[in-house]
């Protein structure tokens, strides 16, 4: 064990934790830190560790503290390797010097005090390269990286130690040494090793493999059997009616039905909403013909006419299921950028840009606690500038999703009711929603909790993903039931896939939306529907303000609270952020806008220029005010409590109202250049991938950061590069999961449930 190499870090810990350290006078800690950087002092420490070379323990053949620890909780091989490493370091042997160079430099307390960074990572490649770089070199041991963590101080120091030393060996050694100084510290070790595959990782892999097999079979069937008309033309057979029912545009409907993710995915409203009516679109391919079976053909004299039987139900079902997996057909439809005539195109731009905004925020926010080496610069330096408020306030992008979700559910459902004389199969209304959201959701949950663990190595990676896995093992069922924003109460955004609180809220709002839609659709009850919307919106604002006032929540740059009622709750307890009664105000705005769009039936609304400009100024001005209003507030003096509670109660409604105007103006022909930009065809394929992008982007960010072997130094330029990289990788992975899981799941659901009657 590199026990001698540990001693400088022990000195640092003692220096950091010395009683004088916690006062404003840091001289004692600085003095101890200075010792670490003096090679002559380290030499003396090494010699002290080794003790008297003439005083050799007869049993172990070791000296100094290594002999003292023989047989006392540290493995013999570890002690021997540690003693060898120290003596070889003093003899300047290459491998020993390489291991020493691979270790992180012990920090100065002053550095930590001014940067906020307590993580100092070892050089992973240099440490493991002790044996791997030159296999012919005679090296008495292999090396590995271990982190020494002091959770009281918050320091993490990377070290290069012999592979024979376990985490418990290092723990026993460090605490034995510290006890000699009558010092107790919360030190533990975590070594960077590959995580072994477990049954749940294998299960998720097998599940993805089954989908992959389905894609291979479906694509082969599509290319090898469904696209045979050109061959049939060259033959003497005339195929007249052996086309499977509903075979034209085989998978277009299921791809278009990605709008079931209303707030996140595309707004192609001509899809078969809730399975009530299917609008068959023109096919871009040649007519699709099923393979001709011998028992369906009767040869007639000199001619080769084909007399066919009606395809069997099971053949039609099998055809639909296989075509659900065709990556050729599905891929062409997912990536198609051509809008339909009834498409609410501007909504696609809104949702994709909101997704970009959220990714931009998460690429900054997730740096804290992972790999950021200039913490105070991001939190108080550049992070305190006015322009950076547009990044810190990106969670308002989720309110955009709520507005679009309420808008699309209301508009599409009322449009469908208009076609079917007010009749909707309400059972399938809910079944379709649940079945089409959940499969890909659960697959992404499996990727997050199981598949990312054995992929890649990094400091704190295993511990972080094991913690996430442990939480999901206990509460995965709350995600399945879409109640993870409420259970366990009061809840936290740090629960299983914490960012999916949005999906829980959206599903809960979806469940109750038909009540309002039914009232709005009936002319005689329309005023009651509008009254319900007003009452729910106002009630949500009042409840949010009341909760904020009761718990003493503040706004702006002041970080304190008005009272201590929150002291009995965990620091990350959630009482407002993910609660449906506080979030529904944005959704009801979307429901109202969806009703207005339905009322005008997609017609252009002629708003006088002056009123249109006034609407845009008020909408954009309100949104910018919500984002920037608190940026210049005092860090030491809180705003009045009544103002803080009121602001927390209405700010999301105000932002949602601005988004609602943008959506309404663009859809009704009053958007001008904004509408042209938001309706750009480029957004349409991206919008179809938005749902998977929302589920996967934290996986991409966390996996990248936790497998990163160096710290991230924040600058706006590096942040932009990081953001663009994460965005590209996220949408590529989203395309993969969409074609592998999401679209096939929609196709299977349609094939099994079929086309319901109008009830």
Image (cartoon, helix red, strand yellow):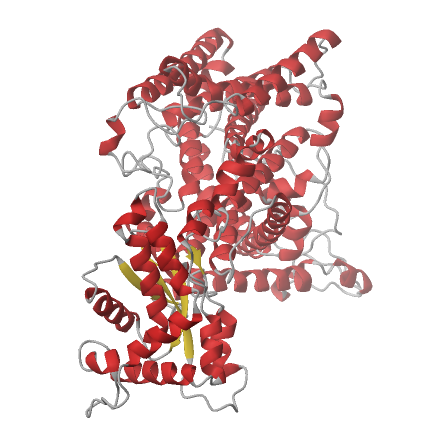
Above-or-below relation of 180 to 391: below
The x, y position of residue 121, in whole percent, is: 45, 62
Name the residue rendered at 50%, 55% in the picture: 705
With 72 as the anchor, is 423 left or right in this view? right
Q: Which of the two residues, 615 or 84, is positioned nearer the viewer here?
A: 84
Judge whether residue 276 can be spotted in this image. no
Q: If the image is split into quadrants, where does the N terminus sit?
A: bottom left
Name the residue rendered at 56%, 19% in the picture: 625
The x, y position of residue 395, in whole percent, is: 50, 33
Q: Which of the two residues, 210 or 416, is positioned nearer the viewer here?
A: 210
Above-or-below relation of 25 to 741: above
Q: How many marks?
A: 0
With 219 as the anchor, is 364 left or right in this view? left
The x, y position of residue 181, in whole percent, is: 21, 63
Judge whether residue 163 can be spotted in this image. yes
The x, y position of residue 507, in whole percent, is: 42, 33
């Amino acid at each position: 064990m590199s026990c001698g190499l540990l001693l400088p870090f022990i000195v640092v810990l003692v220096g950091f934790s010395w009683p004088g350290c916690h006062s404003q006078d840091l001289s004692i800690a600085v003095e101890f830190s200075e010792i670490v950087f003096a090679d002559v002092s380290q030499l003396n420490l090494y010699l002290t560790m080794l003790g008297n070379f003439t005083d050799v323990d007869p049993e172990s053949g070791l000296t100094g503290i290594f002999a003292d620890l023989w047989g006392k909780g540290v493995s013999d091989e570890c002690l021997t390797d540690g003693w060898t490493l120290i003596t070889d370091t003093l003899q300047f042997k290459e491998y020993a010097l390489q291991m020493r160079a691979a270790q992180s430099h012990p920090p100065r307390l002053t550095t930590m005090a001014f940067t906020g960074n307590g993580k100092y990572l070892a050089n992973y490649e240099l440490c493991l390269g002790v044996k791997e770089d030159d296999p012919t070199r005679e090296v008495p041991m292999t090396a590995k990286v271990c982190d020494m963590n002091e959770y009281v101080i918050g320091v993490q120091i990377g070290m290069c130690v012999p592979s024979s030393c376990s985490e418990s060996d290092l723990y026993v050694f460090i605490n034995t040494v510290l006890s000699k100084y009558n010092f107790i510290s919360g030190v533990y070790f975590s070594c960077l090793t590959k995580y072994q595959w477990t049954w749940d990782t294998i299960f998720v892999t097998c599940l993805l493999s089954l989908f992959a097999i389905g894609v291979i079979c479906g694509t082969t069937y599509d290319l090898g059997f469904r696209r045979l008309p050109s061959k049939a033309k060259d033959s003497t057979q005339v195929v007249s009616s052996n086309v499977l029912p509903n075979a034209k545009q085989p998978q277009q409907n299921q791809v278009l039905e990605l709008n079931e993710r209303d707030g996140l995915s595309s707004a192609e409203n001509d899809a078969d909403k809730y399975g009530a009516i299917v609008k068959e679109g023109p096919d871009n391919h040649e007519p699709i013909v099923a393979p001709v079976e011998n028992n369906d053909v009767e040869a007639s004299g000199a001619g080769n006419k084909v007399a066919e039987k009606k395809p069997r139900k099971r053949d039609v079902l099998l055809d639909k299921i296989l075509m659900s997996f065709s990556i050729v057909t599905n891929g062409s439809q997912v990536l198609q950028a051509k809008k339909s005539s009834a498409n609410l195109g501007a909504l696609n731009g809104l949702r994709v840009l909101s997704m970009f905004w959220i990714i931009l925020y998460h690429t900054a926010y997730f740096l804290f606690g992972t790999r950021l080496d200039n913490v105070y610069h991001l939190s108080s330096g550049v992070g305190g500038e006015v322009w950076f408020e547009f990044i810190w306030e990106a969670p308002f992008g989720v309110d955009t999703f709520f507005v679009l979700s309420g808008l699309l559910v209301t508009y599409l459902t009322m449009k469908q009711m208009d076609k079917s004389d007010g009749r909707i199969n309400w059972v399938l209304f809910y079944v379709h929603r649940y079945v089409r959201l959940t499969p890909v959701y659960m697959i992404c949950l499996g990727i997050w909790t199981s598949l990312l663990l054995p992929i890649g190595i990094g400091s704190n990676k295993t511990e972080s993903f094991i913690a996430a896995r442990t939480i999901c093992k206990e509460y995965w069922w709350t995600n399945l039931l879409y109640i993870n924003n409420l259970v366990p109460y009061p809840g936290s955004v740090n629960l299983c896939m914490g960012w999916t609180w949005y999906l829980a809220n959206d599903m809960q709002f979806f469940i109750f939306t038909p009540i309002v839609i039914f009232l709005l659709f009936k002319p005689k009850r329309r005023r009651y529907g509008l009254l319900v919307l007003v009452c729910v919106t106002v009630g949500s604002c009042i409840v949010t303000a009341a909760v904020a006032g009761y718990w003493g929540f503040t706004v702006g740059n002041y970080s304190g609270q008005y009272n201590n009622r929150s002291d009995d709750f965990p620091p990350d307890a959630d009482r407002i952020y993910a609660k449906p009664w506080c979030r529904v105000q944005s959704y009801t705005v979307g429901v109202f806008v969806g009703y207005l769009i339905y009322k005008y039936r997609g017609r252009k609304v002629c708003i006088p220029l002056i009123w249109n400009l006034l609407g845009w100024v008020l909408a954009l001005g309100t949104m910018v005010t919500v984002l920037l209003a608190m940026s210049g507030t005092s860090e030491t003096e809180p705003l009045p409590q009544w103002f803080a509670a009121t602001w927390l109660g209405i700010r999301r409604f105000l932002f949602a109202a601005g988004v609602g105007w943008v959506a309404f103006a663009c859809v009704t022909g009053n958007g001008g250049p904004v509408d042209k930009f938001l309706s750009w065809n480029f957004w349409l394929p991206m919008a179809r991938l938005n749902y998977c992008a929302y589920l996967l982007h934290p996986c991409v960010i966390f996996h990248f950061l936790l497998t990163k072997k160096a710290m991230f130094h924040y600058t706006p330029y590096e942040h932009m590069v990081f953001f663009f990289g994460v965005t590209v990788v996220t949408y590529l992975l989203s395309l993969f999961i969409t074609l592998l899981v999401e679209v096939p799941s929609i196709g299977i659901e349609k094939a099994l449930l079929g086309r319901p009657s109008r009830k």
